[in-house]
Amino acid sequence: MTVLVDTSAVVAALLVDDPNHEAAREHFERLLDDVEELVSHSHAVVETIAVLQRKSGLPAVHDYVLGIEPTIDVVWVDEQRHRRGLAALLTGSRRISLVDHISFQLMRDLGIDTAFAFDGDFRGEGFTVIP
């Protein structure tokens, strides 16, 4: 099984003051043991670093870059996927971010049906969500 890892799960796993911290750590450890592949994309990496830096500073970014990101296969967003994400953003709900639209597209393109996320938008798009 392949699972997409969302920014919300990484942030929760790394920041002890996040309300989902314990659940995120527990599920992340299980996923590392139980799934074939963890996937994300380059736009989500940028978002994750920005959120971690803003909320907690460079030590959290360091923990992500050296500890978590190497365990995830990162798909680089090309111009076509970026433009498809922008089109979805401009025609969809204003509450769903560009990064999430690209995540949904990537999941559909790769046949991934499960996301590790604390973001309800994945469930709203019909995906299975861990936890």
Image (cartoon, rainbow, N blue to C red):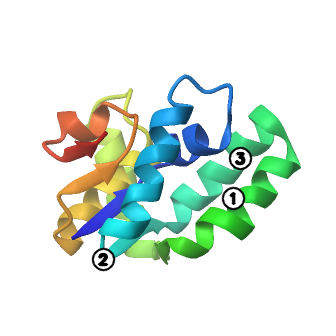
Count residues near mark 3 (Cα–Cα under 10 Å), then give few for <14, some for 14-19, many for 20+.
Answer: some
Count residues near mark 2 (Cα–Cα under 10 Å), then give few for <14, some for 14-19, many for 20+.
Answer: few
Q: Is residue 124 above or below residue 36?
A: above
Q: Helix, strand, or loop for circle 2?
A: loop
Task: Tell me the quarter of the image containing the N terminus.
Answer: bottom left
What residue is disc 1 on? 64
Q: Helix, strand, or loop for circle 1?
A: helix
Residue at the image point whose x is 37% and y is 35% from the top? 96
Residue at the image point whose x is 47% and y is 72% from the top? 77
The answer for how far apart the CA atoms under marks 1 and 2 are is: 20 Å
Task: Tell me the quarter of the image containing the C terminus.
Answer: top left
Which mark's residue is nearer the viewer, 3 or 1?
Answer: 1
Q: Amino acid at mark 2?
A: Glu
**In front here: 27 or 105?**
27
Q: Helix, strand, or loop for circle 3?
A: helix
**In front here: 110 or 60?**
60
Q: Earlier in the sequence, mark 3 or mark 1?
A: 3
x and y, in percent, of residue 10 in the image: 55, 48
Q: Amino acid at mark 1?
A: Tyr
Q: Earlier in the sequence, mark 1 or mark 2?
A: 2
Question: Among all residues in the image, which is located at the extreme left?
Answer: 126
Left/right placement of residue 57 relative to residue 6 reads right
The answer for how far apart the CA atoms under marks 3 and 1 are is: 11 Å
Q: Amino acid at mark 3?
A: Ala
**In front here: 81 or 70?**
70
**In front here: 69 or 121?**
69
The answer for how far apart the CA atoms under marks 2 and 3 are is: 28 Å
Left/right placement of residue 79 relative to residue 92 reads right
Residue at the image point whose x is 73% and y is 69% from the top? 66
Residue at the image point whose x is 80% and y is 59% from the top? 62
Which mark's residue is nearer the viewer, 2 or 3?
Answer: 2
Please give the label number shown on residue 36: 2
